[in-house]
Image (cartoon, helix red, strand yellow):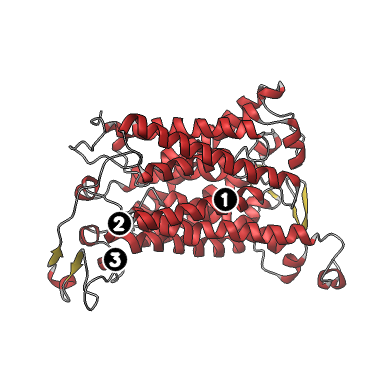
Amino acid sequence: MSTSQLTNPAPDWLNKGDQAWQLTAATLVALQSIPGLAILYAGFVKKKWAINSAFMVFYAFSATLIVWVIWAYKMAFGEQWGKFPLVGTPGPVLTMQQNLAQATLPSAGVTTNFNLSTMIYFQFVFAAITVIILGGSLLGRMNLLAWMVFVPLWITLSYTVGAFSLWGGGFLYQRGVLDYSGGYVIHLSSGTAGFTAAYWLGPRLQRDRDSFYPNNILLMLVGAGILWTCWNGFNGGDPYAASPDAGVAVLNTNICTAMSLLVWTILDFVFFKQPSVIGAVQGEITGLVAITPAAGFVTGWGAIIIGACSGSIPWISMNILGRMQWMKKVDDVMGIVHTHMVAGFLGGFLTGIFATIDGCAAYGVTNPGGAIEGNGKQVWLQIVGGLFIIGLNVFMTSLICVFIQYVLRIPLRMNEQQLLVGDDAVHGEEAYALFFEGERSHLSLHPNGLESGHIIESQGIRNAGGSGHETPTGSTGKGQAKDE
């Protein structure tokens, strides 16, 4: 490409509306991670884990970006790596010539009306939020050094394969599996990988599992609100244009989420006799997740039906299956397996039923819609795509955890003192300084505590029961049935 073409502030291929919307959408998705999930996690966990949980988000966001621009972007969206239809050829995307040029996805045959640096950043924020969602399963016990190694390995070995296979022109893309904005690539992937990593990591201390009360539900609601509103960029940005279908995706996203939250809350009323705010947040998230693979493909009625399903089926998964002892053997702190794996697979499956020919055409694919359009084959394609993502993430996540633990000899878990004390032992900091000159308010070390092992502990309370909470072992919350 000539120098004059690169330095032209308005080349012929540039659509300033598309460029502006794509950067806006990417920024909205970034806000979902920092601060959205950072403060949602910090509010949900026990007070002693607020800083560590939020910092895991900030670290993952930073590490993913460096990995992304040095080699991972091309693995997800570049030229296919030889005859291997699962991943692109790794390489950097850091030169001015690359970044000023028009963005294309060569293996998918997609050309956009904005430049490559915009595409790189847009796709990065999706990669980052995926591993951050995964981290929600691991809060309250993962060794920070292990997390620092896990993030780049998982992005490289797992995320890029899923992204290339479904979006970048890989074999699932070529076969017509539909994933509008990441129901499979992001949510099914993170839910499966989070649950798998939690298995290898082991549970929190039993005392933390028995009494794990959220330290700030209002803060959690702020994070949930950021997630919801910024999801307009998450789904609205994926047509790669400020198009009519982007508007459809935004509207359907909000319709489905509202319906899902309402259904979840009604089920709480019916079965627990009181609405759980944390449960309502879970219902919001399952609605956002379930509509993601379908957002611009389905009608408004389709969005309502998907919302009704996402407010009920993951509710059953979390509040019935999630309370069974065999399910509790894996300590998934945020319930990611229910809110992302179950809801993500559900959304992908329902996309195969409710996708319309017009919605697919408006998005720019020639897919003949789903079962309601007479294309029952699409349902099976969606199932196959979902099973591939599940298998990929179980295998790769297990491989990475075993490599870190047994080859690198880095413990996956914090040591016993860190598990007992929390943020003060891990970071030398605590989230709140509420007393007088800033004395610690919950569980803290004396000035010489790291040497002496002496600990000050204040009295805690047991967490209340209800939808979205993990029931304390051996106790039954008000309005809850005993664990199976």
Q: What amino acid is at disc 3?
A: Val
* Foreground: disc 3 or disc 1: 1
Tag 2 near tag 3, CB within 8 Å: no
Residue at 76% across, 67% down: 100
Q: Residue at x 31, y 69 (%)?
A: 427
Quarter of the image where one finds residue 274: top left
Q: Nearer the viewer, residue 137 or 210?
A: 210
Callout 2: SS: loop
Q: Position of residue 183 (x, y in %)?
A: 56, 41
| Percent position of residue 129, x then y | 52, 54
Q: Residues within 10 Å of mark 2 (few under 14, many from 20)?
A: some
Q: Earlier in the sequence, mark 1 or mark 2?
A: 2
**Mark 3 neighbour class, 10 Å CA radius: few under 14, some 14 to 19, many 20 or more:** some
Location of mark 3 (residue): 426
Where 116 falls versus 478 (above or below)?
A: below
* Disc marking residue 231: 1
Residue 215: which numbered mark, if any? Answer: 2
Amino acid found under the numbered disc labelled 2: Asn
Q: Quadrant of the N terminus?
A: bottom right
Q: Residue at x 15, y 61 (%)?
A: 458
Q: Residue 297's spot in the image, x, y percent? A: 68, 36
- Which quadrant: the C terminus? top left
Left or right: residue 140 compared with residue 297: left
Label 3, secondary structure: give it: helix
Does the rendering let one see residue 331? yes
Residue 20 percent across, percent down from the top left: 72, 62
Residue farthest to the bottom, as pictured: 437
The Cα–Cα distance between marks 3 and 1, rounded to whole angstroms, is: 33 Å
Marker disc for residue 94: none
In terms of image quadrants, where is residue 423?
bottom left
